[in-house]
Amino acid sequence: MRVFKFGGASVNSVSAIKNMANIVSQYQDRPLVVVISAMGKTTNLLEKIIPGIPNNETEHYELLQQCYDYHLTIAKELFDDAPNDTFVKLDNLFDNLKETSFSKPTEYNYDYDRVVSFGELISTTLVSGYLNSLGIRNTWIDVRQVIRTDNNYREGIVDFNTTCTLVNKTLRPLLQDPKSMVITQGFIAGTETGATTTLGREGSDYSASILSYCLNAESMTIWKDVPGFLNADPKFFKETVKINKIPFNEAIELAYYGASVIHPKTVKPIQNKGIKLNIKSFVDPSAEGSIIGPFDSIEPLTPLYIFKNNQTLISIQPKDFSFIAEDNLHTIFAVLAELNIRVNMMQNSALSFSLCIDHNEILLKKLRGKLEKDFRLVYNSNLQLITIRYYNQTIIDSIVGGRNILLQQRARTTTQLLVEL
Ligand code: ASP
């Protein structure tokens, strides 16, 4: 059994969905689970209509209309305007979305999950209906009945035991026939009481990995708009190298440092079961791609670069001139954990603790509010964090290019540099 994941870019237009249908039609020799994200940038749009967010009713209606028009234009073209019960299902979903997005605001994260989940419910309904209309028989499954999380809205923590039980009860029986196919949503999940949760932005890779784990899939494949796992983001680097083989641990490290090719939580579940993860191009589906698996080292061995823009460096100094030691660090980390602030790099000296985080005005204000009584905080913003694995000095010099380095760390294989943009 295989598990495929198609992201937003692979289903963002009529031609993209036709291409995706063509890909899955070539893998019908074994049961297939297809996990799909919201189409294009739908999640970004839905984030603007969380109850309490739109500035006014006109704007709210406009955004809803935009979302409806985008999906319906694609659906009409795919179905050649022929009547199909998919249109009824889509209309129901949009009615529901309207009602939910106009409901009275409650807790933001709870409302967020209820609204943004429609992106995936709509995309999978559309794609499943289209594949069925082509004769590519499949069953649409609401993954909220299958992937179980706690009620930590926007970042649900998966209960793997319950999820695997539910997978065995609901999904597995549908996947007996070699030609069987299940279409389901990425990113979204459900709680014990039936509330909708999400797994964090870009979480569809993780959804596919959870299902692969529970199904003991033979492989998982993420279909992307790049040829595979590249040694740098092509947005930052012209000459990229495709890495053909990546050890599980290397992939976890890279995702941890911010490589955008896979969601950080994706690799661990499949590593535990030894399930190989293919990264393939939906633009050139027959090309090799990359494989994350039980390898000893990356192949080819080449430097790997991860760039993160919009970083802020915060230096924290105790007001009483005490040293930065365990007690002060304890206070600082308790606040960071409380505010859910992820530290991308840190360093301490006798009198100051420096940390680099993704810039976020609101969180910075909160951090300052909580620490200002005992500490002095100074900032530098608009910085770039560069992580290089398998570095040497020549590589560092050419990447930094004479820019001011504010913070630097070197370990055996990895160096991190925080530089001015
Ligand atoms: N649709 C969600 C997002 O845009 C999940 C995903 O695409 O992986 O973050």
Image: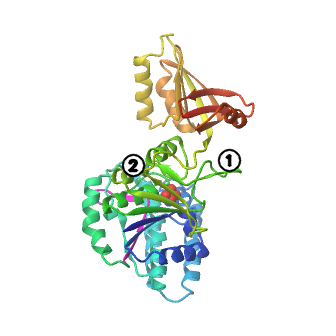
Residue 388 horizontal/vertical position (percent): 60, 38
Q: What residue do we see at 35% from left, 77% from top?
A: 178
Label 2, secondary structure: give it. Answer: helix
Q: Nearer the viewer, residue 35 or 248?
A: 248
Q: Is residue 35 placed above or below 301 in the rendered structure?
A: below
| Disc 1: which residue | 236
Find the residue positioned furthest to the bottom. 82
Helix, strand or loop at mark 1: loop
| Residue 283 placement: quadrant | bottom right
- Is residue 139 part of the magenta span, yes or no? no
Looking at the image, which residue is at 54% across and 66% down? 39
Residue 238 visible, this orientation: yes
Q: Marks 1 and 2, how far apart in space?
A: 27 Å
321 to 15, vertically: above or below? above
Name which residue type carries label 2. Lys
Picture quadrant of residue 228: bottom right
Chain part drawn in magenta: 180-197
Label 2 sits on residue? 268
Whole-percent x, y for residue 89 in the image: 43, 78
Measuring from the top left, give residue 15's x and y in whole percent: 61, 75
Circles 1 and 2: CB distance less than 8 Å? Answer: no
Density class for disc 2 (Cα within 10 Å; few <14, some 14-19, many ≥20) is some
